[in-house]
Amino acid sequence: MKFSKLQGTGNDFILVDARTTEREWSKLARVTCDRHFGVGADGLILVQDSTIADLKMRIFNSDGSEAEVSGNGLRCFAKYAIEKGLAGKISSPAESRLHRDNRSLTVETLSGVRKVKAYMSGDKVNRVEVGMGLPQFQPQQIPVKVDIPIASGPILDYRLIIDGKELTLSILSMGNPHAVSFSSQPVADFPLTEIGPKVERHPVFPKKTNFEIARVLNRGKIEARVWERGVGETLACGSGACAIAVAAQLLDHVDEQVDIILEGGTLTVSWDRVGEVLLTGPVEEVFTGEWPGGKS
């Protein structure tokens, strides 16, 4: 099985053209993503055919669970599909077709169709903008088990006590669940490896959740760390960056465009409070290889 490994601000993925093949993808994700005995990655991404978009993306976390969407994964997906010429070979009755320059495409995900725009340097993609859809705030949409009236608006101050530490959470969905906590202290000092998994698996989140700890530096910059559901702490998270930016805007901490500074690099998020959230950042190919057939 041929694969490529790509990374977007340190969030790394194994990309596979799965349009004509089928495997035990969950098991394969656990094996290939292992950083000691496998390729090493945060997740496995499949390129598949779609009847409603130009291509379909499936993403499996390193623990084998399937995720709804990934902002950084979509950016890696776009680079892989465009540079490999996979997008140009599609002939499906999609509502939105590829531009002739192969720089824009629509991608089907479990959380809906996402629009992707690639910025080229010659014949290479070096930066990608993803339309991440509209943020969702209703408890049943996230989902989260909280006793809050439907008309009460976004959940921006939910208090959760973990190991005696009180967290004030902004809870929303970017196609997947997120809980964001803002701190006045440097995020490097936060015990994320201890608190993160307990927030992820807390009973209030029936499908678990991604957890972000963030500190507002000014109205255009936020530093953050992310504990990803099914993965653990990662160097970056695209949907997490979007969740942080949305929550910060609603709390009037930042303006419409903000840089989210993560350990793996900086992602730029724009939102006008009306349309979808836009995520932009760099993307690189790390290497290509071939996975032995008997190891899946």
Image (spheres, grey):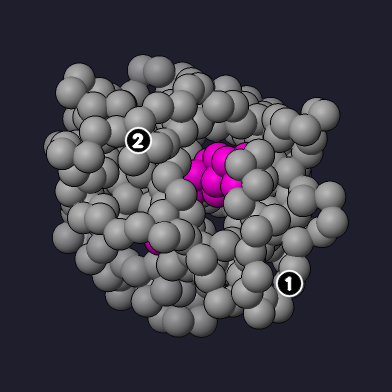
Residue named by callout 1: 96
Is 190 above or below relative to 60? above
Instruction: Give x and y (percent) for residue 292.
Output: 24, 33
Instruction: Give x and y (percent) for residue 38.
Output: 23, 27
SS state under label 2: loop
Q: Is residue 182 visible?
A: no
Q: Which mark is residue 88?
A: none
Amino acid type shown at disc 2: Asp
Is 91 above or below relative to 254? below
Q: Quadrant of residue 145?
A: bottom left
Q: Does residue 138 appear to the left or right of 140 in the view shown? A: right
Residue named by callout 2: 42
Magenta residues span 68-81
SS state under label 1: loop
Q: Quadrant of the N terminus?
A: top left
Q: Residue at x 32, y 67 (%)?
A: 144
Amino acid type shown at disc 1: Ser
The answer to whether residue 76 is magenta is yes
Overall secondary structure of the magenta section = helix
CA–CA distance in space, label 1 to label 2: 30 Å
